Image (cartoon, rainbow, N blue to C red):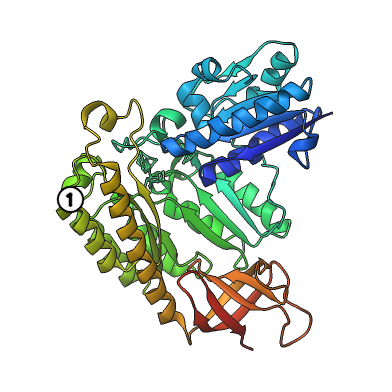
Amino acid sequence: MRRVWIETYGCQMNVVDSETLMAILVATGGFVAADSVAEADIILLNTCSIRDNAEQRIWHRLDELGALKRRRKGMIIGLVGCMAERLREGILEQRPAVDIIAGPDSYRSLPLLVKEAEEGGRGINTELSKEETYAEISPVRLDGAGVSAFVSIMRGCNNFCSYCVVPYTRGRERSRDPETILREVGELFNAGYKEVTLLGQNVNSYSWNASGKGGRVYFPELLKQVAEVSPQLRVRFATSHPKDISDKLLETMAGMPNICRAIHLPAQSGSSRILEKMNRKYTREWYLDRIAAIRRAMPDCAISTDVIAGFCSETVEDHEATLSLMREVGYEFAFMFKYSERPDTVAAKAMPDDVPEEVKTARLTQIIDLQNELSLASNKRDVGKEFEILVEGASKRSVEKVFGRTSQNKVVVIPRSSKVGADHKIGDYVRVKITSCSSATLQGEEVI
Ligand code: SAH
Ligand code: SF4
Ligand code: F3S
C-alpha cells in the first residue's frame, strides 16, 4: 500500500478533481490517502495557472519537496492539474525532481504513471480529451466535515476570455451525464450531506443530449432535478457567465426554496470597452439588465462577482466605471485581482500589458475598499432579519460558538447551546435572528 498526499491549489474544480483522482488511485487497491506529508510515499500537487503568483507558489513548494525527496528515498513527486497541462515536460527543465506530470483529463492513467515513476522513469500524460468527465467515479471526499460537497457537472471552457488560461489548460467544454450526477447527489444525501455545489466554468451552458429519453437536458432542468433529491438538501452552483444567465434559470431558482439565494456572476469590469477587449460577449448595460432580472425574480438573492483591476489599456474612466458598477449592483461579496498576463492567451499575444504595476495596485486597493463598504452595508441590512442557517463547524474565535451559512452564503456565528434540547451540531438547520455584524460576518441567535 502506497500512501498518497494531495495538496490542492486553485479553484473548486481542483478540489473535486483531487477527490476524483484519489478515488481512481484507491480503486486500484494499491493506494490509501495519507494523513500527512510526513508519512506520504507519493505527493501530488494539484496546481493552478490562473495568475502568475499561483504558479510562483507551486515553484516554491516544489523546491521544498525536492529537498524532502533528497532525504527520503523512493518518494515520488507528481505535478497535476492546470500548470502541468500548461507547461508539460517543460516543468522538468526547471524542477528535475518531478516524477509525474498529469493534465486534468488524464487522471485515469495515474496508476500507470505512478508505476512508470516507481520503475525509475517518468510518468507523463498531458493529453486533453473532448469527452472525459469522470462521470461514473464517486470522488473520495477529503474535507472531513461531511456536510457540503462539490459535484462536477461539466469540464473545460469554450469562452476564451482574452486574459484567461483556462480554455488552454482544461480544454473544450463538455457536460456530464445527468444520471450520474443525480446518482452521486443521491448518494451524498444518503451519506448525510446537506449541501451540494454544482461546478463548472460556465454552468449555464450545461447541455446533455439524452437521446431517446426526452431530448436535451439544459442547466435549469438539471438544477431542478438535483433540488428535487430532497427539500432538506441545499443546492448551489458556480460559475454563471453573465452572457447566458437565462430567465428560465431564474424562474427555476425562484420556484424552489432549497436552491440557494446566491448567484456568483463575475462582471470582471464595468467598462463596456474593456469588456469587449476581454471578449466577455456582454456590455455593462446587458450585465445590469441581468442583475435587474435577478432582483425581480428573487429580491432576497445575494449577488457576488469577480473583478480584474488594470487590464490592458484600462484608463481612469474605465476603472471608475468598474467602481460605479460595483456601487450600482451593491455586491454582497467579490473576488478581486490584479491583471496578470498569461502566456499564449489572446491578450498576451495582441494587447500590451500597459497599466503600470503601481497603478494596478492602487486600483485594486480602491476596489477592495469599496467592496468592504458594500459588504458591510449589505450585512447591516440583515441585522434584525431572520434566516435559516446550515451549521458547518465550530467558530474559530470561541468554543462556545458555532458558525453556519445563510441561503445567501453569508457566515453567521451563533451560541453553540440550543434553546431547546442538545447543542447545535454540524449539519443542523437552525432558524436565527441577526443581532450584529462586521463586514465579514453576522452574529445571531436562535429563534424558536
Ligand atoms: N469561469 C469562471 C472563472 C474562472 S477563473 C468565470 O468565467 O467567471 C476565476 C477568476 O479569475 C476570473 O473570474 C477572473 O476574475 C480571474 N482571472 C482569470 N484570469 C486572470 C488573469 N489573467 N489575471 C487576473 N485575474 C484573472
Ligand atoms: Fe476563463 Fe472566461 Fe472561461 Fe471563465 S468563462 S474560465 S474567465 S475563459
Ligand atoms: Fe481552476 Fe486555476 Fe485551473 S482557477 S481551472 S485550477 S487555472
Q: Quadrant of the C terminus?
A: bottom right
| Residue located 38% across and 58% down the image | 249
Quadrant in the picture for residue 101: top right
Q: Residue furthest right?
A: 1
Tell me where residue 131 appears, x and y as whole percent: 50, 28
In this rendered view, identify the residue nearer to me: 234 or 72. Answer: 72
In this rendered view, identify the residue nearer to me: 263 or 14. Answer: 14
Q: Is residue 114 left or right of residue 289?
A: right
Q: Secondary structure at mark 1?
A: helix
Quadrant in the picture for residue 327: bottom left
Q: Quadrant of the N terminus?
A: top right
Disc 1 under 8 Å from ligand 2? The reply is: no
Tell me where residue 400 appears, x and y as whole percent: 72, 77
The quarter of the image that holds ligand 2 is top left
| Residue located 23% across and 42% down the image | 355
Q: Which residue is mark 1?
A: 272
Tell me where residue 422 appears, x and y as whole percent: 79, 80
Q: Is residue 57 left or right of residue 416?
A: left
Query: Compared with residue 19, is residue 400 higher up or lower down, i.e. above or below?
Result: below
Q: Is residue 109 left or right of residue 201?
A: right
Q: Residue furthest front?
A: 358
In this rendered view, identify the residue nearer to me: 445 or 212. Answer: 445
* Dot 1 amino acid type: Ser
Tell me where residue 397 appears, x and y as whole percent: 65, 70
| Residue located 70% across and 16% down the image | 117
Please tell me how crowded label 1 is: few (under 14), some (14-19), or many (20+) other residues with Cα within 10 Å.
Answer: many
Query: Compared with residue 15, is residue 407 higher up or lower down, i.e. above or below?
Result: below
> How many dots with numbers?
1
Q: Is residue 300 visible?
A: no
Q: Is residue 148 visible?
A: yes
Query: Compared with residue 275, is residue 348 higher up or lower down, i.e. above or below?
Result: above
